[in-house]
Amino acid sequence: MTLRRLKSESGRSLRDIERTTRISNSSLSRYLSGQATPSWNVVVALCRVTGHDPRPLRPLWEAADRGRRAPGRPFDAEKPPARPAPRNDLPRDVAAFAARRDEVDALVRLARAGHTVAIDGMGGIGKTALAVHVAHLMTSEFPDCQLYVDLHGFTPGREPVPAPEALLALLRALGVPAGRIPDGLEERAALWRSELAGRRALVVLDNAADADHVRALLPGAGRNTALVTSRNRMVGLDGVEPLSLTPLNASDAAELFRSALGPGTAADPETVAELMRRYGGLPLAIRVAAARLRHRPSWSIADLLDNPAPTDEAGLDKVIDASLARLSGEQRRMFRLLGVFPGTVVGLHAAAALADLDASEARVLLDDLVDANLLEEPGAQRYRFHDLIRERAGQIARCETAAGERNAALDRLTAFYLHCVKAGREVLEPTFERLPPLGYMAKDVPKLDTVARIMAWFDTEAATVLRIVELTAERGQDEATVQFALVIGAFLGRRGEMDPWYRIAAAGVRAAERRADPKELAKVRYFQGVANRFAGRLADAEADFAAVLAIGAELADVSLRLQGLWRLAGIAEDRGDFVRVLELRDAARAVPETDRYSEQLAFARLGGGYALVRMGRAADAAEAAQAVLAMPEADEPMLRITALRLLGHARLVQDDAEAALETFHAMAAVARATGHEANAAAGRGDVAEALSRLGRHAEALDEGEAATTWSVDNGEPHHELYTREAFGRICLAAGDRDRAAHHFRRSLDIAEPRGYRWVAEQARRGLALAACDLPSTDDNPSSAVPT
């Protein structure tokens, strides 16, 4: 059976067959006359038209096809049709492409291995530029074709290109006749994979909406690859390698800016670095900034710093809004409310409280925003915006969220953080007064049941907590401000963060004054006094503690009286007024003992202890410390630390350095176990003193230097002046007079203007010893930091 016979039996005209098969009339004539051998696909098409089974014709067609290639055939002399040039649809490569070296290398490696790669990232991050750049680099390795299609997944004002429509364009780009392209999605996808199977092809599928949008467009078998870009992570695509783009680091951002700026423009590194911080490492913003400068010859780079990040000129708002348009109502609400969040990084539980959701509900929405590259997840269950997206989120929160809803969200957030710090403080300081619950109760809160968990949580959240307290005070929420002031010291005191502690305590004092509650005012003034003292402001601290004592006397409040007397004794110790110390100590001891105030009485017993040590009454100091350690209340960490430390210094003066060393080690262990970094550091200084007395100078220098470094790094004058004076004596005992003189001088510089007369005198004495060749005699009883 020949093709002519098929045509004859069908009874159809040549024109009718042409219309049905979409094979040209001239080609049909050549096939039917034997002048050319058709492809097998053409034979199948003709059989379908005439209603015949093509399979019996296969051997005949294969013989004819072999004969067509054999030498001596008449039409072998015919010149075969010229092969069309390979199709290259790639957009122009980005001029002066810079940075992203690691990503370029990874893409090239994966493409060479035949992997499809899904590149995701926020709008403006440079996904398309990277994909197109790599496609241009690899043109020679995929010689058959380089195809590109913009799927418009996030193009403002346009609907995404449907997958069937995209397949039609791609198949036509491969030269497949329209008549051979089926209508159904699955059929088109199968034909697309079949056409690619025999080619070395590279395909860029740009701006996909999501995994479903691009799934049917992916290549199948064969030596080809596809680079997919999307703002959404393609988590639903099996066998596709993900590559998530993040903002450029400082050096890469600066490189891109200089490259985009071109030669001939002076670029001060510091100014460029500040500019790059403004633009958050976003390539689109950086390129637009460079273009603005190129088109303004009178401008310098510094002039760009006086202008806001060019979100409008770069179209960044539209870029972000296009991503937002793909969100559900719940996802958009979460995005809006995150725009109200006053910090930089938000934890899962805080975000849940902000949106009034439980943690599992919030996690789903946050993960959706991460997958949409509108939110980053720098750590487990920790989320943040890119700076420019945060700015847009804030704008949307102000425009789309009523003031009442914004305030309600902030109220929930404030209540959440207040609950967490109160719960943490109850574990850190279980004997302290518990505060009543206030306002909203979050549906889920983090687990804060151990010192380690509590302090890890606070270290992570500290910046946000401080900002929340500031906002609470600014918003006139006096009761919450007072509660923050009463509990925050349990955290900041452990970390030696006295300045923020003072600011919060001062805000609490102002709030308590407005609330006109004398007892509440005395409590917050007490904590303000503690922060003032450790910041080296002795006069301010004395005024605070005197106020606590006066209010305690007025209200006949034994607890307030004891706290005021104990702390005033500490101020007198700092000033070296030991007579005043003993007067205050006697006044505290005269307060009738009662179980209700046993802890305050215990602290009061320790008050003036260092004065006793310095006055040569070490046995009395040791007796007071041991009496407190025998009390049931001694399990309270700060009380135990204070008593052990006093006992250790008393033993030093009693020339029992081994016992002192053991006591100081025990004190430091309690401090470390309970998260008291400041006291743990002080404990290392105390250990250094004991080691020095024992002649173990190398160890003493190491421990003393560590304690001094901590006090310097934390910027806490009170601890630094005492620690430096003690370390000066340790250096002197080790024979390092220059080093000793340096620390004595620094201690004197800090102590003298602040009124620490006793330490200032000891530092002067140390300087004199360091300046002469006399051997050091450590007859100074102790310079421990009074607590």
Image (cartoon, rainbow, N blue to C red):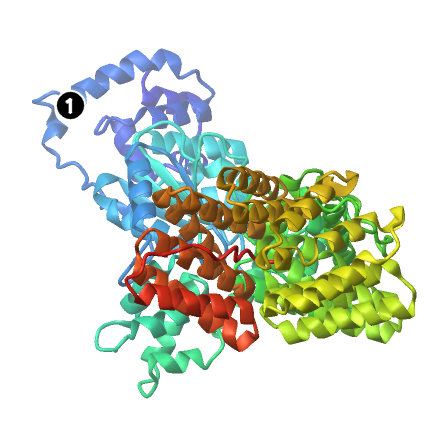
Q: Is residue 775 left or right of residue 620?
A: left
- Mark 1 element type: helix
Q: Nearer the viewer, residue 41 or 607?
A: 607
Q: Quadrant of the C terminus?
A: bottom right
Quarter the N terminus occupies:
top left
Residue situated in front as seen by the camera: 505 or 410: 505
Q: Nearer the viewer, residue 53 or 132?
A: 132
Q: Which residue occupies the extreme left position in the image?
A: 72
How many numbered marks are there? 1
Categorize mark 1 by other alpha carbons within 10 Å: few (<14), some (14-19), many (20+): few
Residue at 45% x, 67% y: name it.
763
Three-letter code for the amino acid on which mark 1 is drawn: Arg
Identify whether 767 is placed above or below 360.
below
Left or right: 235 with respect to 413? left
Q: Which residue is mark 1?
A: 69
**x, y percent for residue 296:** 35, 84
Q: Quadrant of residue 202?
A: top left
Is residue 400 among the parts visible in the rendering? no
For the point 45% across and 24% down, the residue is 48
Q: Residue at x 69, y 42 (%)?
A: 626
Give the quarter of the image for residue 325: bottom right
Q: Where residue 520 sits in the image (x, y, percent)?
A: 84, 65
Above or below, comparing residue 759 to residue 775 in the picture: below
Left or right of residue 596: residue 155: left
Q: Quadrant of residue 56?
A: top left
Q: Whole-percent x and y of residue 494?
A: 61, 52
User: Left of 628 or right of it: where is 284?
Assistant: left
- In percent of width and height, residue 262 lies at 25, 71
Q: Name the residue: 45% across, 47% down.
A: 688
